[in-house]
Each structure stands twice: as C-alpha cells, then as structure tokens.
Image (tube, coloured by chain):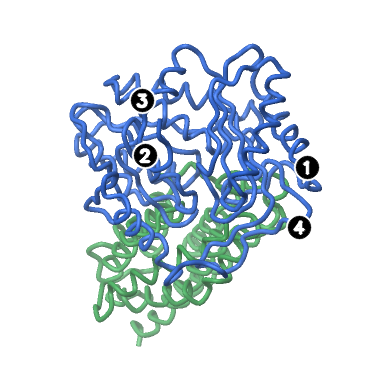
Amino acid sequence: MQFLDTSYGSEILSELVEVILDNRDYLSEVDGSIGDGDHGINMAKGFRLFNESIQGQSLSLSKALTTLANTLMGSIGGSMGPLYGSLFLGMGNAAKDRDELDAGAFGDMLSAGLTSLQSISDANVGDKCLLDTLVPAVNDYRHAVDNGQGFASALQSLRDGAKRGCESTRELEAKIGRASRLGERSKGHLDAGAVSCQLLLVRLADSTERHLDKAAA
Amino acid sequence: MQRIINDPDNVVDDAVRGYLRASPNLYAATDHPRVLKYAIETPAKVGVVTGGGSGHEPAFLGYVGDGLCDAVAIGEIFSSPTADAFLEAFRAADRGQGVACLYGNYAGDNMNVKMARQMAEMEGIQVKTVIARDDVASAPADQREKRRGVAGEIMMWKVGGAAAARYDDLDEVIRLAQKAVDACSSIGVGLSSCTIPANGKPNFTIEPGHMELGIGHHGEPGIEVVPLPNAEAMAQAMCDPILADQDFTGSDVAVLISGLGATPVMELNLLYSHVADRLETEGITVHRADIGNYFTSLEMMGATLTVMKLDEELKPLVDAPAQSLALTR
C-alpha cells in the first residue's frame, strides 16, 4: 500500500503556486469572456504572497494548506478568496496531526475541503463554478478508492474527473457570480474558477504521485 | 496603457496612500491597510460600513464622512474586499450600538461580509446588513434577489448614514436603508470598455458607434447592444425600463446620474435635461438631482441613471447634511 509522507507540504504546494503563476494570463482571459477578467490576477497575487511567506520553510502538508488558506482569505478577497480559502482550510484541518496519508485518508482530506467550501457558499454542481470541477473529481477519486484501486490509479481518476468537470462548464448556463446575469449567453465559455480548480487538482495529483514514489522507495 | 501608475499590482495600495495624504481631515488609517475610517468619531451612534472593489471611485471610500459611512473596506480592482477587511471596518465603526453594513449584491461581497459578520459576532459586535439590488437590467422584477447593486447604493448610504447621524437605532437604520434602496431603480449605458491596469487590455469590447444598454459596473453584459443614439434618444432608452420597474406617477423623486469615468460631466448634464423632460411629461416631480461622477467603472464611457421614489420619511434623510469627498450637502 502506498502512502503520502505529509512532510512534503512545501514541495507539493510550491507546485500549486507554479501552476497558478504560469496560468495567470490564461485565467484572466477565460474570466474576461463572461466575468470581469480579474481571476488570474487575484489568484496569482494570493499564491505569490503565500509563496513568499513560506520561502525557506519546510512545512507539513497541513500547515502549508492552512497557511495558503489564510493567505488567500486575508489577501485576495473577491469570491475566490473565501471559496479557495475554505477549501484549503478544510483540507488542512483534515490532514492535521497525520504523518502520512493513505489513499483513503487523502480522499477524506479532499472531502473535508469540499464540505468546508460548501459551508460558506450555496453554490451547487451545474451552477458553472469551481464545484463543477471539484465535485466530480472528488467523487471519481473516492469511487476509485472504494473499488480497491491503488493510490496512483485513484489520482488518475481525480485528474480525469477534474478535467471532465471543468469541460462540462462550457455548456452550462451560469447560475451564480457575475456571469449568472448573462443567462444563455454564458454558454460556450469555460468558467474561470472551474479552470483554476482543474489546474490545481491536476497538479496536486501529479505532485502527490511523484512524492508517493519517493515514499515508497 | 495611458495610466498614472507604478506597479500595476499595487495600484490600490498606492491610491489609498494618496487619499490618506490628500484628505487627512476626512480619513484616518486603521490596523488594516485596506480599511479607512472617518477621522471624526461620533460616540454612541450606529456605525455605518460599506465596502467593495476598487475602480469605482469615488465609491466606495468617497462616501465616508459626516452623515454617511463611518468606515470602508477596500478591495482589489473590481473584486470584493477580504473578510478581514470587512471585520476591521466593523471594529472601526462600532460605538457599541451595532453596525449597519450597507453594500451591493455581488457574490464575493456576500461571502466576505458573511464571514466577517460571523467573526464580528464572536467579538460581540452586532452587524446587520442591507444588500443593494437596484439595477433593473440585471434581472427581472420578479427575480429582484438576483439584481446587482449599482448607483442606488449611494442613496442607501445617504439615507442610512443620515438616520445613524440622528441617532436612530440599528434596526431603524437598517429599515430605512433598505427602504431607500428598494425605492431606487437604476440602469447603465456603456459606450466603451475599461482596462484593469494589472490586466493591461480592455475587459470587453464595445464597437465604436454602439452602446450597451443595461451594462454593469464591471462591464457585465446588459440587455442589448444598439447603435449609439443621440442624447435625447439615450435618455428615453434609459427611462423606459426604469419607469416600467415601478410606478412613479405623481411621485416626487430623487434623480442621480453618474458618469462611468470617462464621459465628460457636461454630457451628463446634457443627458439629464432630457431625463428631466421625460419625467415631467410622465407627471413625476424631481425633488432633487445629483449629476456627476459618483460611481464609476475605471475609464469606461457611459452613465448610470437612478430614479428614487420619495415619501415624507425618505425626503428629509435624502436632504440631510452630509460631508464627504463624493457628496456634500
């Protein structure tokens, strides 16, 4: 059975920082089609501040996630500060006091993040928002684990679910946020939050998988 | 980009520093860099707080002052302030009589205010809210809960602030601020796009020779894009949906026209003359009109029109003295 050593918090979250900074302009461009074009700017700002605050520190996964959550909630505002902040806070709390996570515990951590996010937002799957990425990704992951698949295989399900979920927002009509006022005209465009969520989950899966190998070696 | 900025990512912080230095008689800093409070503290009154994204100046910080708001939370450009900022604004405004948080209906603001309110309650600060939903173009009347808040927010701050200034209690301030914004119907027209400095390119496109009726304060698409009419026809196009939204016949009203940032004030007054004609024709009496750049969208060209139905309760509050950067009576 494979485990994730939770001492790799700084390493894993540095990769999340990287994917957001690399996609800053792309995220703003996606947002500009039906939103106000600031998604990449705000996300990049929050993740950059987080990166600066953890420089030279080797943080546990829980501590790194909690620090990221507090930075996002305290610095970027908008909708994404509270949404991503509560997601990472829920995940960070779930990983607290654990030296390692097996595939099941990693799934519990994802679910705790989802529950935390849903406690501050009334958004649902189908609203054209980041939940359209997050919910199928978490469900697919848990389904894979429940079917006895290994950690790496379950992470592939996480990636697949995230990509499928993100793509599903293209044909959805926005129900929340600024794009919701567009009604029918929001169709045909991806949701920026769903895209950033997909980027983050795919990179989380990639990075986790690489560190699984290290732990197993 | 022809803009007066340093690092595009620091535009808001740099601007806040400027406001503090230019108007020390109005603003005092707080423990949070994105929260300003009124320099003069009146004891024992209900605190009035607002907040929202930057780029709408003089909203939101321009409405901090006498007879208006006591503290303001300042967000990134077109982005809600953080929950931390709203919380600090609640602390700065609280005089033990509770805080009225008067803001506009946007997803980010709703979430951050909700979180800040929970944190404030743990500190023993009572916070009640009124959420402005005056933009008639953003959703039909039977889905008013979906409507955005636009320039009607100014009337909400004016009435709520005046009620707090005469020492009404929290429930009364909330009731009157809600009544004020419910009495407002607003609509915007956009004639050009706007550019967030950190983005470096226009947020959306309006073809030359066209205007977008019903555009939002962040460029949210409106009802329709039409060939740019003359001012007289534009006034009719703006008045039609407002007059259809509520029955103003025989009423006294307050009218507010705000430029969106790049339209000359002269043209706003020109537009108003046609609005005034139309209202007169409809048997509506203008009690007072405020015309200027009150609630903008960076350097967008265009304007918003707000018509507020007045009664004997609202009139003195709309007329009450006020002193701030944006509004003085």
Residue B207 image label: 4
Q: CA distance from mark 1 to mark 4?
A: 16 Å
On whether disc 2 and disc 3 are found on a single subunit, the reply is yes
Question: Residue A150 versus residue B201: which sits nearer the camera?
Answer: B201
Q: Position of residue A92 (x, y in %)?
A: 31, 61
Instruction: Give amino acid for label 3.
Output: Ala
Q: Colour of chain A?
A: green
Q: CA distance from mark 4 to mark 3?
A: 42 Å
Residue at disc 2, secondary structure: strand
Q: Nearer the viewer, mark 1 or mark 4?
A: 1
The residue that disc 3 covers is B162
Q: Quadrant of the N terminus of chain B?
A: bottom right
On whether disc 4 and disc 2 are found on a single subunit, the reply is yes
Q: CA distance from mark 1 to mark 3?
A: 38 Å
Instruction: Give amino acid for label 2.
Output: Ser
Residue at disc 1, secondary structure: loop
Q: Nearer the viewer, mark 1 or mark 3?
A: 1
Residue A110 image label: none
Mark 4 belongs to chain: B
